[in-house]
Amino acid sequence: MVGLPLSLDGSQGPAARKVNAFCARLRKATDLPVMAWDERMTTVEAHSLLRETGKSPSKARGAARGKIDSASAAIILNSYMQSN
């Protein structure tokens, strides 16, 4: 599962095209199924969830950024799992 950074309107910009190219290379190199999944608004949702648990960092730097990224990744995976 790879986060796909779509624009808010759902279109694919340069970052999303890079992710799709990366996914294609990864599929070819590993012969594993690789799925790109919409990651819109996951950082906002991660901040909200971390705030609710009292763990939200005030500035997204260093280890704090890692917490946000980890929470965002969990949200993306959960979204994918719930869709199936």
Image (spheres, rainbow, N blue to C red):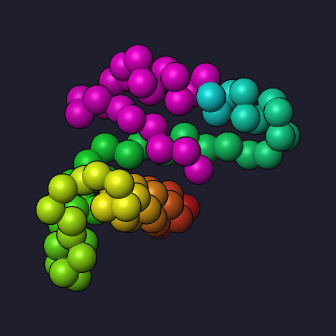
Q: Is residue 79 visible?
A: no
Residue 51 is drawn in which quadrant?
bottom left
Magenta extent: 1-21
Residue 16 location in percent, x, y? 44, 27
Residue 20 relative to residue 83: left or right = right
In this view, the residue farthest toward the bottom is 53
Which residue ends up furthest to the front in the rendered image? 62
- 36 or 83: which is nearer to us? 36
In the image, is residue 10 part of the stretch drawn in magenta?
yes
Residue nearer the viewer, 54 or 31: 54
Residue 81: within the magenta?
no
Answer with left or right where residue 44 lies relative to residue 71.
Answer: left
Residue 46: tell me if it is visible: yes
Please name the residue shown 21% across and 69% down the image.
Answer: 56
Residue pictured at 53% horizontal, 30% vertical: 19
From the viewer's side, name the closer residue of 57 and 25: 57
Image quarter hosting the C terminus: bottom right
Give x and y (percent) for residue 10. 31, 31
Which residue occupies 83% across, 40% down?
30
Q: Nearer the viewer, residue 65 or 40?
A: 65
Q: Where is residue 57 in the image (x, y as percent from the top left)?
A: 21, 65
